[in-house]
Image (cartoon, coloured by chain):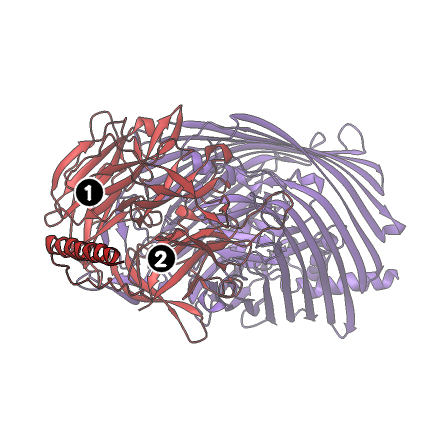
Amino acid sequence: MKEMKRILLILTVAMVSMMSMAVSCREPEPEPEPEPVVVDKDYNFDLFVCAVKHGGMSKNKNGTYVRSVPDVTADQPMVEFTGKGIDITEDYTLESITRGKYYYQVPQRATGGFVKFHIERNAAGEESIVEDAEVPFKNNVYSARKYTHAWINDSTTLVIVGTADKATKIIWSKLNESNLAVQSEGTFDISLPTGYNAFSTTGLLTYRKSDGKLYYFYLAKPAAGLSDAATSVTYIAVIDPATMKVESNTAVPAEIMEETAGSAYGELMQNMIMYDEADNMYVAGLQTIDGKEMGILRRIPVGQKSFDPSWNGFPNPEGKLLTVQYLGNGKALSYSRDETLGTKIDSKSHFYSIVSLSNGARERVKFNGKDLQYCGGRFSQRSTVVNGKAYIGVGGEVEGAAEETNPTIYIYDCKTGVVEKGVELSKGFCFDIIRAMDAE
Amino acid sequence: MKFRQIVFVLLCALLRIVPLFAQDSLVVKGKLNDTLMLSNATVTARSQEQQLREGAYAVGAVNIRIQAATLQTLTQAIDRSSGIRIREEGGVGSDFDLSINGMGGNSVRYFLDGMPLDAKGSGITLSNLPVNLIERVEIYKGVIPASFGSDALGGAINIITNRQHRNYLDFSYGIGSFHTHKADFSARFTGRRTGLTIKPVISASYSKNDYLMHDVKVRNADRTAFIVTDLPRFHDDYLSLFAQLEAGVSDRSWADDFYLSASVSKVDKELQTGATQSYVIGMAERNTKALNLSARYAKKGFLTDRLDVNATVSQTWDHTQTIDTTYRRYYWDGTYIEGSYSEIRHRGKTLRNYRRPMTLVRGNFDYHLSEAHQLTLNYLLNRTGNRQDDAWDADYVPTDDALTKHIIGLSYNQVLFGGKMDNAFFVKDYINHLEVGQSEFASTSGAATAEASSTRNYLGYGVGSRFAISDPLAIKASYEHSVRLPVSREVLGNGSTIYPNLILTPEISENFNLGFFGSWDLGGGHVLSYEANGFARLVDNYIQATVSETEGMMQYVNVAAVHIKGVDGEIRYDWAGKLHLAVNASYDDCRDQREFNQDGSRSITYRNRTPNRPWTFSNAEASYTFHQVGLPDSRLRLTADYQWVHWFFVTWEAFGSASTKSRIPTQHIVNASLLYSWQGGRYNLSLECTNLLDALAYDNYMLQKPGRAFFLKFRLFL
């Protein structure tokens, strides 16, 4: 028994000695950092619908309506548009620049200038539009919808870029965010390459924080208007936002990208450029595969100014890649089309996927284990990412003689990947945009 | 009964025609006393307007002769008619849209003495056709006789010109607000020896249309902000010239009428706005010129006593040029920015030429089976070319399209029960042939999918019936399965503000009319008459004009279906040819009938009221005539009329809260005129004030109409 106690004592001493040695070998334990407190901002969700047909790029002549609601969770009452909401058809375009609670655009009513407005809700929940500023063009003139934009100087300056003179010149204007005053204007020192006769209508403009440069993606095309991707060349112009001088202007090899996913209306509606935490830039584009224009997702690594030719975040595409939005942690939300299910604007062939940017793997967004349905709306942006959640809208479903469903918003938790059902919209409308706007 | 009919006819004519000042005497040779003059007038009116109203079809008739001395344009007179609404885009010479019982745009066809008005050139419309030339206007509502060879869906306007068989000279000159001038000359001369008749017509009108625009946005002094102000229009000049010479013979053994005609027209129009007035244009123009050569032949008893023939051939060379060669972006104060896009198309600069040669061949054969039964065969060939080129844009590829229509109509008319009942049955065959060469804006125009050459055949048919129960009560009903082929403007665009739509399909409609009419002689010269009509237009593939994108462009598109149901009615009161009161009102309910969208989902607009169209409106008119005022054989007529149009939404009424929706406000327009005529109508002086109360009024997409305007007109008739 004594022997037993001795052994236990030796073992205890040995363990304590080893533990004390182990402790003495480690760095002193730092004070645990407090978890960053993420305070969810309050947003209003502005929901845009159109009658009869999808209204993206304003081909819809049947009416555009918007409701602004503070909550889109499932316990909210259905969002109605009959006798409710704002009819913006005559005055404003569906496509718009937004920031905070404000909208900025060249309005539909074509008064010859820019307008800034926001949506207000009264105590009864009735929405109205309040115009905060309207200024005339200075020298450069833009058409409704036909411009691209970027924010610089800590978002106090809005840069607008468009084309002029049968899309043979690229013009720009800098506007003061608060009152829309035109600070400066000019024309980029960019000429059409030999053999090409027109630039894309607007191209895509973006501002990269890490190098403080504007990147302008544009196309050189054989003629103005629609053209096959294979006949265009994509260019990247890097621009100093202070001087607006073009620092570099390089063609993108066709095998990397033939066209950006959109080039006619900037990102006034659809998001085609995104950044990750490291400020790698991702651009959705088109590539001709077996005679069909298919989606491609390319990356310009941080610190570089051209695409990484070896990286494609959207391999084996089913069709065109239409929008991309960064979700965090190397994941993105894509909205793309399955060419086999229809290629019309209203074809129910569009769907959402979660894309892993590490390996290009993607999986359709599911609810209760079932894929979210295919939607109509080639030119739609029914998803927005705020407060660590992606709010994803789908249109009403019609399958054979089955009862048509209501357009519905699904809420995807970016951390957990859990999808819950959100609010429904009244049946029959073409759900086109969801915008998360600062509540105040 | 016969006595009552005679009294009725005499009183009707007396009360309706007494205001005929100048014109009344024109039918009477030499100096006649009032009684005889009125008798003549009575016979004339009975045989034309009254017979039309009492026919089997739903027809309205407007006597232009009694108003010619005051009118500026035909549209003014027609706009006051029951069931008619004219929406104007601006002032003198502006584009307009006329609707009959809710059907407007190109659903309504226009004819000049039975021939398509287009033959005079695309620049000639109701707004610039010389008023003095016109005898009356017939308005066919919904159901149109086969004799017109028409594919109209909503109705037809047939303008009947002066067919007097005596020599005359008619000259008028008017001057009005907004720098408006208008001069018309027409005459008829028949050589005694040769029997050759020559009928010259010359008409000119001009206006700067510089009326005040209210609440327009312009830049402030340092051009950094907008201010709202009132400013005159500055680029809306309008010039219209029309000349015609007709020569031929009448009353020959081989022809009742055989005339050759040549006419030229020129219409230059500055463009001030796009489809909405917020888009200001300061340089662009649309100019049109046309030459027409035609021949017409008419013979009653052709080869056999039972056959009447009426034939016309016509060739028109129509050239429209749209000048859009500046990149300026204008504001309402006339200032501008040297911008990036052209004014009309909002793209590159263009100087576009549209050459639209039109060939018309019309033959109408009436075979009288007996006095009460008649067969009519009508054939109309209408071929309209559309050759486009651009004198500025070297990249533009010239195009050459053609739209050919063959319309064959066969009708059978019968008169039963001693004239109490009148029936008409008809069938029409429509053949449409389209050749497409243009490819511009392929995705918008449909050129990408349209067949280069296509021929389609459609069948229409209908029936009309009228039964007179008694003088105060007659009933008429009519029905037509009608087809309306798209016109070139709808399919091929207008070169400036309307995109082509090459895949438009014809409108097809089931048109129903049911009406009552009658008249009471209240004694003492008081006569009360009325008419009330109910109608339904069940339209498929309705062709609707819609605003396209932001550049102020429009395009005609097919809407799956609409149903229009409504009523219109008019009450008229006359007293002894001095006092005339009339009021009419129209209501129609136009509902979208497309139940499903293209993707199979249920349409939310199903059974919604169709947006952007007036649906309730009313007119009231009062006039009083004084006789022998001052000068011998003189008359003074004072007239006032009031037009009211209920407000309406620009977009679907059901969606969005009402407070946020664009609407076209209610219109209250009062017009007044004074006409003094002496020497039996040889001399006429009129003063008209339109929009007397200077009300702010809009018709189309918030395009402001002119404010108060005056027009002074002198007319000489020899």
Residue at image location 38% in from the left, 39% down from the top: A362
Chain of the residue that carries numbered disc 2 in the rendered image: B
Q: Which circle marks residue A187 in the picture?
A: none
- Residue furthest toward the top? A290
Give the Cα separation between the discs numbered 1 and 2: 34 Å
Query: Which chain identifier belongs to the purple chain?
Result: B
Depth check: give the residue in front, B157 or B527.
B157
Horizontal side of residue B29 vs A308, given as left or right: right
Quick one: label 2, few (<14), some, or many (20+) residues within 10 Å? many
Residue B145 image position (x, y, % from top left): 71, 43
Q: Which residue is mark 2?
A: B278
Where residue B45 sits, quadrant-wise, is bottom right
Question: For mark 1, what is the residue?
Answer: A215
- Residue B669 vertical position relative to residue A25 in the rendered view, above or below: below
| Chain A drawn colour | red
Relative horizontal placement of residue A118, taking residue B184 as reference (left or right): left
Q: Three-letter amino acid code at disc 2?
A: Ser
Q: Position of residue B422 (x, y in %)?
A: 82, 49
User: Looking at the picture, do discs 1 and 2 lie on one chain?
Assistant: no
Asked if residue B296 is positioned above or below residue A85 in the image, the reply reads above
Numbered label tally: 2
Q: Dot 1: within a 10 Å radius of its alpha carbon, few (fewer than 14), some, or many (20 or more) residues? A: many
Identity, as a three-letter code, of the amino acid under mark 1: Tyr
Q: Residue at x 55, y 62 (%)?
A: B654
Residue A310 appears in which quarter of the rendering? top left
Residue B277 in view, yes or no = no
Residue at 74 percent across and 70 percent down: it is B527
Q: Residue at x 32, y 31 (%)?
A: B391
